Image (cartoon, grey):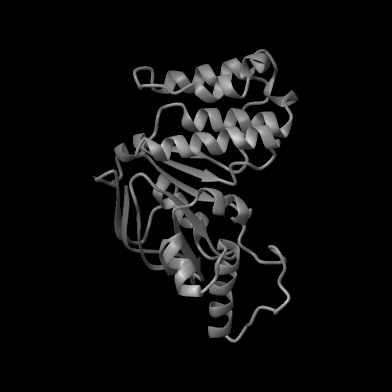
Amino acid sequence: MIDATNLRKRFGALEVLHDVSVGIRTGAVTALVGPNGSGKTTLIKIVLGLARADAGVFSVNGQPADEAGAYRRHIGYMPQAARFPENLRVRDVLELVRALRPDAPRDEELISAFRLALEMDKLVGTLSGGTRQKVNAAIAFLFRPSLLILDEPTAGLDPIASGILKDKIRQLRGEGRSVLITSHILTELEELADDVAFLCDGHLRFSGSVAALLERTGERRLEAAIAALMRSERARTADPLPESVGPLGWLPVEVEPS
């Protein structure tokens, strides 16, 4: 689904991505993890066409990424915190988005599952954070994307809504579509992820199945396996993690603000 080769990105003197080559499998959920400042957000922005790599190439669904950006029609994106015009009603926001691609096939299942019909006449500015996140999710899935990029997708959702969204992600995987997900909730990634891509200091340090990562680290849980990767990286740079890192602890695997 995504094939990236030798991606590089520099901001001034800071090289954020160093020859990153990664593949996102069709029909799999891939967790993108790593410390703050590891390059995760930059990588996502390059895939979305919001930033341009200084070197390297990538394709989405076999379609090379170029300046025309036609490949982006295959992508659905759910940012960590979507921003909609606060003076519009929910139905206005949805109609605006639908009008962008009037002939595209639609998937409005989440609109029904989240009971957004009850919110249609409310101004966006009056919505709770959880309801905004439901609208955010409904829009991300709306055009039946082949690739869905989810940034902290369950943030602000109640347990029922979170379960609905997770089931929807599993449904996409079952249909042979691909999901790239970032989350600081490692138990959530453990529920959903088939593969893991681990970035640290702009280098891709691991890319493969969850099973392969567990075997490599000798751990039984994804959270512990990611912590082991981070310990290895910190030890390599002479900045070891403390032995007493608890569940998440200060383990910095959350996505940087976009």
> 114 or 211, which lies in front?
211
The image quadrant that residue 240 belongs to is bottom right
Q: Residue furthest bottom?
A: 238
Residue 219 screen position, x and y as percent = 55, 70
The image quadrant that residue 121 belongs to is top right
The image shows a total of numbered marks equal to 0
Residue 89 screen position, x and y as percent = 64, 17
150 vs 20, left or right, is: right
> 54 or 228, which lies in front?
228
Q: Is residue 15 above or below residue 69?
A: below
> 156 or 54, which lies in front?
156
Instruction: Give the residue displayed 70% in from the left and 79% down from the top.
Output: 242
> 152 or 101, which lies in front?
152
Instruction: Give the residue displayed 40% in from the left and 49% down from the top.
Output: 47
Q: Is residue 210 above or below residue 15?
A: above
Residue 42 screen position, x and y as percent = 48, 56
Instruction: Give the residue displayed 44% in from the left and 53% down from the top.
Output: 194
Is residue 164 something that shows in the picture?
yes
